[in-house]
């Protein structure tokens, strides 16, 4: 097969994104919803589904690495220096924005496919701010500011856990680490009896994990390194949304990539699922206050997503599949930002949340 055309990877992205969008819509799976369930309702089922996806992604991705198909050092997730502050701040901003919008970038694409016009506005603003932070007016501040604060790694060491621990131990630990993480996360999900009785949720988790592995495969096997050299990539929905917006408006050739294909695929997959279930409904903002909240959330997600190097899928699953050192920092920042956002939405203000957390919310009676 002739792979000289980059449109092959775009087609692969369309297929992988379409399957993910279809499955996630049918399962009502959402990263912010999963975080909210765990933080507020102490219900960890949907978090375990994402754990299942991560376990499959880790096992598959580490297998690709061990067989020489994928080189982690060629991806954008394992640099020679770790910009820890930018990742943490970006994750915090993304998590807060996600709470204000009510879902992440991936979830916004799923909502758009089901007819939610609020998500169309969010994605346009999100993509514009992300592009401005990636290559536009805010790029200089990003590169010369937060990203300069980085921890350099020892020479010959990549910013992933197997490489770092392997250097410390004196031998390669990638296989046992990948196997332990993958099997452990998968077993945790299947051990939950209630989850085993929710086939749509389990299927969505399995397909998300396989989608990450498929993305790595597509962007290594379907790329002509001489004609169109590109870094391997997989599912993520920050810079691809920005580049898709740019491609639609200015340069259609920039749509010839896996990321743009997956962006369009998720929306189309969710559309197909919504129509099949007769759940496609046009929705719009209820009032100006809701619109302002969504717009602010879109701005925070766009800037934060570029700073931390991905979204809840891009960092939470794709970077996680590489066992990248950025993964725990980004996920922790997003979780913290989401919790602050939930406090703002549920308790009226951050100060009320802090008073309640510190046990000083009520008056004392003697």
Image (spheres, helix red, strand yellow):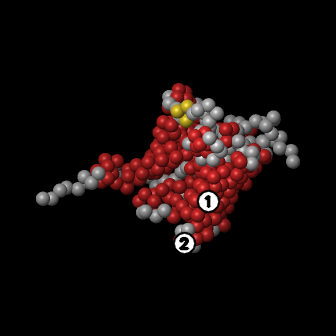
Q: Answer whether residue 281 is visible to the viewer in this image.
A: no
Q: Which residue reaches farthest right?
A: 1
Measured from the top left, where is residue 283 in percent x and y? 54, 57
Q: Pointer 1: what residue?
A: 183
Tell me which residue sits at (78%, 46%) in the image: 221
- Residue 145, above or below 28: above
Instruction: Please name whichever residue, 282 or 352, is drawn nearer the observer in this view of the structure.
Output: 352
Q: Residues within 10 Å of mark 2 (few under 14, many from 20)?
A: few
Q: Pointer 2: what residue?
A: 193
The mark closer to the camera, 2 or 1, is 1
Measured from the top left, where is residue 41 in percent x and y? 42, 63
- Residue 196, above or below 34: below
Task: Check disc 2 and report its element: helix, strand or loop.
Answer: helix
Residue 327 located left or right of residue 291: right
Q: How far apart are labels 2 and 1 at the CA level?
A: 17 Å
Tell me which residue sits at (34%, 47%) in the image: 350
């Amino acid at each position: 097969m002739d792979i000289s055309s980059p449109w092959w990877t775009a087609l692969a992205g369309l297929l992988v994104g379409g399957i993910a969008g279809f499955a996630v819509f049918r399962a009502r799976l959402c990263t912010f919803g999963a975080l909210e369930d765990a933080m507020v309702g102490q219900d960890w089922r949907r978090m375990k589904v994402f754990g299942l996806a991560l376990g499959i992604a880790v096992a598959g991705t580490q297998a690709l690495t061990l067989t020489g198909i994928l080189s982690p050092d060629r991806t954008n997730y394992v640099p020679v220096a770790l910009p820890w502050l930018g990742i943490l701040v970006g994750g915090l901003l993304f998590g807060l924005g996600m709470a204000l919008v009510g879902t992440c970038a991936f979830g916004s694409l799923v909502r758009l496919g089901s007819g939610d016009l609020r998500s169309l506005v969010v994605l346009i603003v999100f993509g514009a701010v992300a592009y401005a932070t990636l290559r536009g007016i805010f790029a200089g501040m990003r590169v010369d500011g937060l990203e300069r604060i980085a921890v350099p790694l020892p020479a010959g060491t990549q910013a992933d856990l197997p490489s770092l621990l392997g250097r410390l131990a004196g031998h390669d630990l990638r296989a046992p680490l990948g196997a332990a993480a993958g099997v452990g996360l998968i077993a945790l999900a299947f051990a939950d009896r209630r989850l085993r009785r929710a086939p749509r949720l389990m299927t969505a988790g399995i397909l998300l994990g396989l989608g990450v592995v498929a993305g790595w495969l597509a962007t290594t096997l379907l790329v002509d390194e001489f004609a169109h050299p590109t870094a391997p990539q997989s599912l993520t929905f920050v810079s691809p949304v920005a580049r898709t917006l740019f491609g639609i408006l200015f340069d259609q050739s920039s749509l010839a990539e896996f990321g743009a294909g997956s962006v369009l695929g998720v929306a189309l997959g969710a559309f197909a699922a919504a129509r099949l279930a007769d759940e496609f409904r046009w929705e719009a903002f209820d009032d100006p206050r809701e619109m302002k909240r969504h717009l602010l959330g879109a701005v925070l997600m766009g800037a934060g997503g570029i700073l931390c190097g991905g979204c809840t899928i891009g960092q939470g699953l794709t970077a996680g599949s590489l066992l990248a050192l950025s993964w725990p920092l980004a996920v922790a920042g997003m979780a913290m930002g989401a919790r602050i956002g939930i406090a703002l939405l549920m308790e009226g203000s951050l100060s009320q949340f802090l008073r309640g957390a510190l046990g000083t919310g009520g008056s004392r009676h003697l």
